[in-house]
Image (spheres, rainbow, N blue to C red):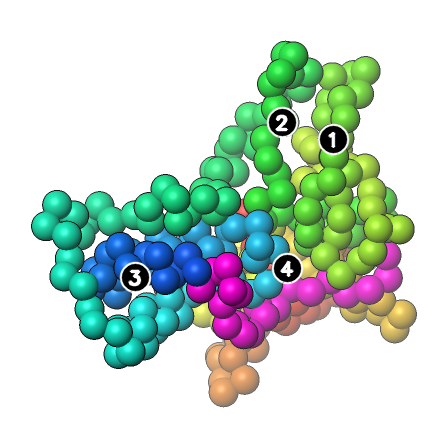
Amino acid sequence: MDRLRPRERKVFSGFTDIEIEKLECLFTEYGELSVNRDFCVKVAKGISRSTGRAGKPVVKWDEVQSWFQNRQKTSPVKAAPPSINQKEISPSPDVSKNVAARPDASDLKKTNESNQVPKAGEKLPDLSELEFEARSRDGAWYDVERFLSHRFLSSGETEVRVRFVGFGAEEDEWVNVKNDVRERSIPLENWECQKVKAGDVMLCLQERKDQAIYYDALILDIERKMHDIRGCRCLFSIQYDHDKSEEKVRLRRLCRRA
């Protein structure tokens, strides 16, 4: 794999037809309560984690709220049902069908550590809904588009076949769940440079003439500098885990491991 995996947030380009149908149902059911912030946060999370949004931008709560506000302008607002407590608002079961809640990362860790073949009829956790990254055979980490299948080795360990974001079926790989799959690392914001310490292990973009991909790297030292209009100007001395090479990088090339 010699292509840079996408890591930047894609620009929100609107809701799909199926998502609009769900929003319409929620608007009909909850009326004026649909613009409640907590409600919109829950709806946005549900939509972002649904199967239909795989590979699409994450939906923000204010985008959901904006949709409901515009919808109210074109239709009479239904009074809120007296039995609904605003603090306990959640999408109705029928509307949120196929919108799976994201399991805690510790759930996958427990699965990894057990290293036991499930009993007959027992299903492997549905990893297709999670935001994960996997380590390829080249030692680099790539975003996972989806998990295609799984298998159990004679050692008791589990492997999954993954499709990487931006790559075709010809580059699908079997990877070890325990060692080579983890929750997706997050790019750092400018103000987060103070959180980075010497000794931390981060995900770092290694830029070369023929490729630019992400590897684990150890933070050796940090040169703190004043920020300017361009953002963080600090320099981070790092050592890549895969080849032990060292260099100085800017914050924009670092991602925080979950």
Q: Which residues are magenta?
A: 1-20
Q: Amino acid at mark 2?
A: Leu
Q: Work out whether 204 lies above or below 73.
A: above
Q: Nearer the viewer, mark 1 or mark 3?
A: 3
**Disc 2 and disc 4: Cα gap in Å?**
22 Å
**Residue indicated by mark 3:** 27
- The secondary structure that dominates the magenta segment is loop
The residue closer to the viewer here, 199 or 48, is 48
| Residue 150, disc | 1
**Disc 4 and disc 1: Cα gap in Å?**
21 Å
Marks 2 and 1 close (CB-CB < 8 Å): yes
**Disc 2 and disc 1: Cα gap in Å?**
8 Å
Choose the circle earlier in sequence order: 2 or 4: 4
Residue 240: x %, y % from top left: 75, 54
Choose the circle earlier in sequence order: 3 or 4: 3
Choose the circle earlier in sequence order: 3 or 2: 3
Looking at the image, residue 193 sits to the left or right of residue 27; the answer is: right
**Residue indicated by mark 4:** 55
Marks 3 and 2 close (CB-CB < 8 Å): no
Classed neighbour count for the residue bearing mark 3: other residues with Cα under 10 Å, few (<14), some (14–19), many (≥20) = many
**Residue indicated by mark 2:** 124
